[in-house]
Image (cartoon, helix red, strand yellow):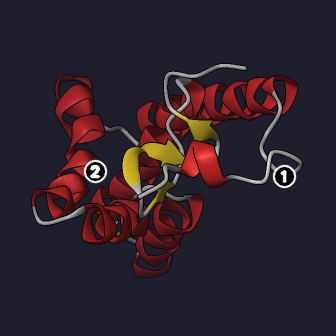
């Protein structure tokens, strides 16, 4: 089977400049979410374990890359964290708001280091290009 890199239409692949902007955007969201975490009174002792929590969604990769991409992408996107935050705000639940902020921070952190939404071909194949290959 051909890899995403071999079959990708390079005219639509993100350029190094675009990837750089997306990484900067992710870093900015990560910092803003950490500020919101502190403003909401999130316990700093739990910030690292909570930031790692969304990675449990990669469990689908135990079965195959297609399921792994699905389970990973369900959690590693802006809409998931924003939705959770909105539920927390609507319900007046600070713990749910904090979980939403953590999900947003995690997605920002991932984007800042070049992790994108996964393609069903391989964990390394993302919407930002192949991980580990800055062009």
Q: Is residue 43 visible?
A: no
Decide which of tag 1 and tag 2 comes sooner along the chain: 1
For residue 115, side relative to residue 97 (left or right): right
Q: Is 98 above or below relative to 24?
A: below
Regarding mark 2 in the picture, which secondary structure is present there? helix
Image quarter where the N terminus lies is bottom left
- Mark 1–mark 2 distance (CA, rounded to whole Å): 29 Å
Q: Nearer the viewer, mark 1 or mark 2?
A: 1
Q: Is 42 above or below relative to 92?
A: above
Could you tell me which residue is drawn at 47 percent across and 39 percent down? 105
Could you tell me which residue is drawn at 54 percent across and 45 percent down? 116
Could you tell me which residue is drawn at 62 percent across and 26 percent down? 27
- Give the image location of residue 15, x and y in percent: 83, 32
Which of the pair 122/56 is nearer the observer?
A: 122
Q: Is residue 35 visible?
A: yes
- Give the image location of residue 20, x and y in percent: 76, 23
Which of the pair 123/89 is nearer the observer?
A: 123
- Residue furthest left as drawn: 62
Image quarter where the C terminus lies is top right
- Residue furthest front as drawn: 1
Within 10 Å of disc 2 (Cα), the crowding (few <14, some 14-19, many 20+) is: some
- Give the image location of residue 17, x and y in percent: 86, 24
- Give the image location of residue 35, x and y in percent: 54, 29
Residue ID for mark 1? 12
Q: Contact, CB < 8 Å: mark 1 with mark 2? A: no
Which of the pair 86/10 is nearer the observer?
A: 10
Residue ID for mark 2? 54
Could you tell me which residue is drawn at 47 percent across and 60 percent down? 81
Within 10 Å of disc 1 (Cα), the crowding (few <14, some 14-19, many 20+) is: few
């Amino acid at each position: 089977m051909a890899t995403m890199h071999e079959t990708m239409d390079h005219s639509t692949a993100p350029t190094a400049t675009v990837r750089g902007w997306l990484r900067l955007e992710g870093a900015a969201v990560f910092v803003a979410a950490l500020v919101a975490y502190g403003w909401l009174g999130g316990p700093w002792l739990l910030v690292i374990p909570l930031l790692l929590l969304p990675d449990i969604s990669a469990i689908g990769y135990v079965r195959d890359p297609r399921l792994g991409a699905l389970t990973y992408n369900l959690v590693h996107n802006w809409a998931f964290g924003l939705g959770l935050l909105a539920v927390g705000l609507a319900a007046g639940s600070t713990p749910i708001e904090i979980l939403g902020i953590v999900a947003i921070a995690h997605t920002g952190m991932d984007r800042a280091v070049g992790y994108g939404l996964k393609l069903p071909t391989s964990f390394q194949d993302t919407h930002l290009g192949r991980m580990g290959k800055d062009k």
